[in-house]
Image: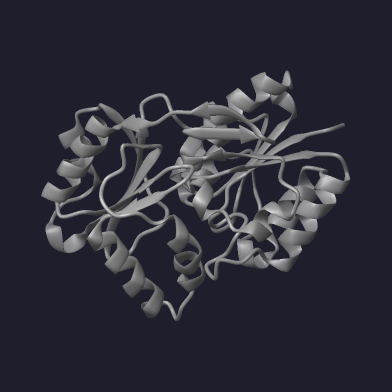
Amino acid sequence: MTRLVFLDVDGTLIDHSQRVPASAQEAVRAAVDAGHVLMLCTGRAIPEIYPDIWDLGFTGIVASNGAYVRLGADVLTDVRLDAAQVAEVSGVLDDLGAHYVWQSPDAMHPSAGFAQAFTELAALTGGQWDRYLDYIADYTREGLPESSSKCTFTVPSATGHDLSDVTGALAGAYTVFAGSISTGAGVSGELVANGVSKGAGLARVVAHLGADVADTIAVGDSANDLPMLAAAGTSIAMGNGTPEAKAAASWVTSRIDEDGLARAFAHAALI
């Protein structure tokens, strides 16, 4: 039976060194060879997906937490915040002393503070993020975009603010998830338009293909994966996942560095 599989990227498919573990590479290729349809389902935008990830055989992507969905060459969803919304959110984040980056299918617009913090993080982690910084360089633009799929931000602890200050200032006008990647001490978050989520992206792909949601499998590890885990027929959390992700899943595999994805695929009878 053909299954439709949705995979988170950070902490699920790629590890802290920005690489796909060998066991995960083998598992993905084996599942594709077995006839299953594999989709990336990530908070990352298209400019943040390394070519060697695509080379594993993914059919499409639910990107930017569901704001952009592409199946093959067909774009199924492309929800953008407009220039006025981008300016509003940026103003709130600036007032709170946050660092942020606007992510779209074709460009990345980091604030000066975000770019500097990420460069410092790469140095502090022994170059683990150098690959990421090098890859997105060609897509990086200055200033605010005219439209954007998503905003990722970090509120440094030194500001005295937290995620509730961001959501409070925006008064429910947007959907905010706790972030899984931080550029340093503090809290991080991810912001998209209301109604956008990985779960909604999964549902869009299922509807387009005329598939049965019971035949879908989702694997993730963090807050933005919760809607995806809830929407899938079978949900699996990584052993390195958050307590909330583990509680939301029907099964918990081992950590990413302990062959977690390969074990998840074996459990789901994909390989």
Residue 229 falls in which quadrant of the image? top right
User: From what the image shows, is residue 54 above or below residue 81?
Assistant: below
Tell me the residue at 82%/46% (across/down): 32
Residue appearing at x 41%, y 24% in the figure:
195
Q: Nearer the viewer, residue 226 or 16?
A: 16
Q: Nearer the viewer, residue 135 or 153?
A: 135
Which residue is depicted at the point 31% across and 42% down?
145
Residue 271 in view here: no
List x then y, in percent, for residue 271. Answer: 85, 49
- The picture quadrant where one finds residue 83 is top left
- Residue 53 x, y percent position in the rendering: 66, 56
Left of 16 or right of it: where is 145? left
Depicted 153 relative to depicted 76: above or below: below
Determine whether 46 is above or below 21 in the image.
above
Question: Residue 11 location, x and y as percent?
Answer: 55, 57
Rendering coords of residue 104 (x, y %): 43, 42
Number of labelled discs?
Answer: 0
- Whether residue 9 can be seen here: yes
- State the residue in front, 120 or 186: 120
